Amino acid sequence: MRMQFLRYVYLAMFTMLLQFIAFKYFYPFPNFMQDSYNYLRSATENIDANMWPVGYAKLIRFVGFFTHTDTVLVFVQYFFYHLCALYFFLTLLDLNTSNPWTRRIIFCCLFLNPAILYLSNYITSDVYFIGLSLVWISQLFRLVYEPSRWLLAAHLLVLVLAYTIRYHALIYPVISITVIVFCRFSVRLKIASGLLMISMIGGFMLYTADANLRVMGVRQFSAFSGWQMASNAVYAYAHMPERPALEVPEQFTVIHRKVTHYLDSLQQVPMSQRPDGWPMMAFYLWDPGSPLQPVPGAVNIADNAAHLQQMAVVAPLYNDYGKYLISQYPLQYFRYYLLPNFIQYAYPPAENLAVYNDGRDTVWPVAQAWFHYPSNKVNTRSGKQELQIFDYYPAAMVVIILFFISGWIAYYSAGGPSFADTRFRSALRIGTFYWIIHYGFSVLASPVVLRYQLLNMALGSVFGVLLWQVARDRIRSVRMAERLQL
C-alpha cells in the first residue's frame, strides 16, 4: 500500500507541475473578482474584521512576508490543494479502492480537474476552503475507524481554520459533533471535545464581533449575513407577480420605499433583460444599482472601506427587514427564492469561472500595489476560448448527482451494505450526511454558483464510483457463489 501511494504522490506532483507551468504560460496574471480586492485590502491593512472572514487575507499576508510575486501565491494555493487532496486520496485507499481503474478515475477527479486549476489562479478563498474541507472530511472518516486523541485534536484545529476562511463552515461543527458522538471515544472525551469545539468557535466569534466593533463601529459577528438575508428576501419580493401595498414597521420605511420604487421601475422591463433575472446572482447584495446599497451607484464597493463600513452599520436593520419580508410572504419566498435556488444547487451557473478578470484588462489599485505591478494592465496569452468548458460544468453537476443517486440504488439493490467494508459504510454515511446538510444550508443561505459546488462535485464523483464498484463486486461474488454451488 505504501509503495502504491508513493507512486500516486509522484504522479500527482508531476501532473501538478506540468499543469501549472502550462497554465501560467497562457495566464501570467492571476484572476480577480470583487472579492479579491476585499481580501487584498484586508491583507494590506492587516485588519481583523471585514465583510468576509479574514482567514484567507491572513494567508495572503503570510505569503507576502516572503514575496509579493503573484505566481508564488497562486502556486501556494495550487500546491496546498494538492497536499489536501493527497490526504483525502490516501484516506480513500483505506476504504475500498482495490480496483485499479477505480483508483485512476478517482485520481483524475481530484488532480486533473480544470476547474481546480482555474480556481487556484483566482485571488479568492475558494480553493483554500476546498482543500481544508477535504482534510476535514477525511479526518471524520478516520475518526470512526482509527480514533485517536491526536487525530481529534488535529480535527478541531482544521475545523477552526475552515471557520476563519468561509461562512459555509458554519455547518461543519454540527456534522463533526454528530460523527464524534458515534466514535469509539469515552463519553468524557466526547463531551470535552464538544465543549472545546464550541468554546474555540465561540471565542473566534466573540473576537470577530469585537473586531467588527473596532473596525466598522458595529458589534456583530457578520455584517455579510444581514445583507444576504435582505438580498434573498428582496429577490423573492421582486419576482412576485403582484405586490400589494405593504405597511411596514417604522424602522423599515426608508429602505422599503427605496425597494418598491426600484421594483416599480422594472415593471416594463422584460424578465430576460432584468438585472435580477435567472440565474440567481447576488445582484441586490453587491450591484451598485441595487436599492439596498447605502450610496446608489457607488463603484469599487468591495474595496471601498468607507462604503463597507456603511454597509456594516445598516446590516442589523437589513437582517430584520429581510426576516420581516419573509414573514409576510413565506409561500412567495419559497416559490421565488428557495425553489429556484434548490434547482440552481443542482445546476449551478459558472459565474466567474467562465470569464477572466470579470471581462476587464485592468485591476484595481490595491492589486497593483500588493503585487508591485508596473501598471494596472493585465493580459493573457490565451484566446480564452477554453473557458467555454465551464459552460458544461452545470450539466456535469446534474450528471454527478444522478450518478451518485443511481450508485446508492445499485449499492442497496445488490446488497452492498452487507458486503462492503465497515470503513466504507461509515464514510458513505458521513459523506451523504454532509451532502444533505450542505444542500439545505446552501439553498437557505445564498444563491448557489459553480465554485461553491466543486467540493460536492468531487465527493459525488468519488462516492458514485465507489458505490458502483461495490455493487459490481457484490454481484460478481453472488454469481461466483452460484456457480460454485452448481
Image: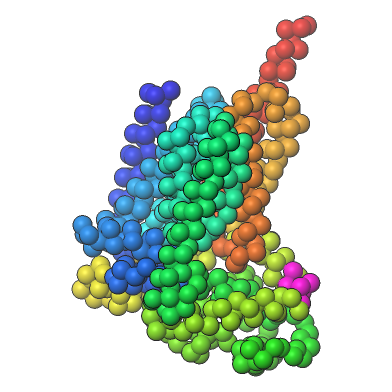
Name the residue: 62% across, 70% down.
279
Name the residue: 34% across, 34% down.
10
Q: Is residue 333 magenta?
A: yes
Residue 246 position (above or below residue 160): below
Q: Quadrant of the C terminus?
A: top right
Q: Nearer the viewer, residue 400 or 415?
A: 415
Residue 436 position (above or below residue 370): above
Using the rendered view, name the quadrant where residue 476 is placed.
Answer: top right
The answer to whether any part of residue 286 appears in the image is yes
Q: Position of residue 277 (x, y in %)?
A: 64, 76
Q: Main secondary structure of the magenta part?
A: helix
159 sits to left or right of 11: right
Magenta-colored span: 329-334
Q: Position of residue 192 (x, y in %)?
A: 52, 43
Q: Nearer the viewer, residue 481 or 201?
A: 201
Residue 240 position (above or below residue 472): below
Name the residue: 49% across, 48% down.
196
The answer to whether any part of residue 103 appears in the image is no
68 sits to left or right of 250: left
Name the residue: 45% across, 35% down.
149
Q: Position of residue 393 (x, y in %)?
A: 56, 55
